[in-house]
Amino acid sequence: MGRSCSGGTEGAAEGKARFDDIYDRPDPRAYFGRLAPLEYEIPHHAQRVFRQVATERAAFDDGRPRKSAVLDVCCSYGINAALLNHNVTLAQMYERYTSPACLAMSSAELAARDKEFYAKRRRPDAVPVFGLDVAAPAGHYAVEVGLLDAAFSDDLEQASPSPRLMRALSEVGLITLTGGGSYVTARTFAALLDSARRPVWVSAFVLRTVSYHPIVRTLAAHGLGTTVDASRTYPQRLFADEREQQYAIAAVRALGIDPTGREDTGRFHSLRYESRPDAP
């Protein structure tokens, strides 16, 4: 993915393509138009996983009258929220936002159509979803069309959560992440968990090119144990060019990972990490 989520630099490696400009538009058409040729697919793989984890987290809830909320980190235009709470697929979203009909609309017209489109497809088991992304226009659009209940542009790599975000975090029971592991660090997760008031689970898809271990250590310090099946990977997208592929192959090798059959075939691959409170 592009660098939408954080002003931090520790995860942003030289050689990885940047797509900063597609997150500051008033609607998601440029996002889908740029990523469609690269077959960006990790939200598709996360859809089933996040629905299952959200269901399990709800069953685990602590007896409060309000449902615990999901916080999607690096939420961009609310893609994960759309897939979690609506009867829609990522392929349908690509088709919608790259269609001639949608491309001909103004942003205001598209937002009005999207609000109706998603309302008709809202699932009965929908849960509250908040979004965190420094790309404020993307989050604003997702709130406007009803995908996110609230959006926050706090940069937790640089500062503490705002009072508004802290109030929202008191309702969060599940944190999700797809693609943003290259741009947020343990600082962001520490800030989120320090402000949590409910038991928080974390479900994350992280590129194999970056180490998730510093975040795992931070989660452990907050009482969360993390599991990962390193033998199963999830394709994220095609490489933008040969330079990006060379970067990815070198990065996974530096972490002691074999790129054979994955990065060396032309795609980024992610691992799925699940973090839950340790048993007492």
Image: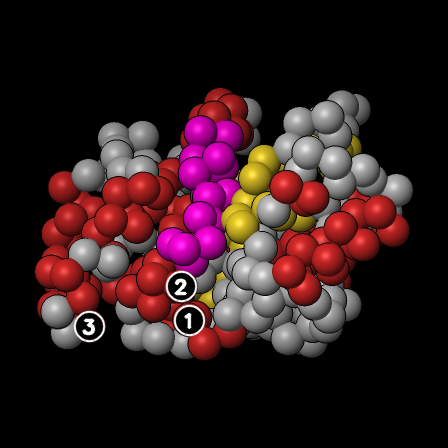
Q: Is the stretch drawn in magenta largely helix, strand or loop?
A: helix
Quadrant in the picture for residue 244: bottom right
Distance from label 3 to label 2 (Cα)? 17 Å
Give amino acid for label 1. Answer: Ile
Between tags 3 and 1, which lies in front? 1
Q: Is residue 41 magenta?
A: yes
Residue in view at x 58 percent, y 35 percent? 234
Instruction: Classify residue 233 as left or right of residue 11.
Output: left
The residue indicated by pointer 1 is: 22
In the rendered structure, the answer to whether residue 43 lies left or right of residue 193 reads left
The residue lying at 40 percent from left, 63 percent from top is 34
Tally of numbered tags: 3
Tell me the crowding category of disc 3: few under 14, some 14 to 19, or many 20 or more residues within 10 angstroms, Cα based: some
> What span is in magenta?
35-50
The label nearer to you, 3 versus 2, is 2
Q: In which quarter of the image is the N terminus?
A: bottom right
Sequence-wise first label, 1 or 2: 1
Q: Mark 2 points at which residue?
A: 34
Q: Residues within 10 Å of mark 2 (few under 14, many from 20)?
A: some
Residue 245 on image: x %, y %: 67, 55
What's the amino acid at mark 3?
Ser
In the image, 64 versus 103, the foreground residue is: 103
**Eyeballing the image, is 215 above or below 143?**
above
First along the sequence among labels 3 and 2: 2
Q: Which of 149 and 116 is in front in this view?
A: 116
Residue beneath label 3, please? 107
Indicate which disc residue 40 carries.
none
Where disc 1 sits, the SS reads: helix
Which residue is at the front of the view, 174 or 41? 41
Residue 198 shows in this picture: no
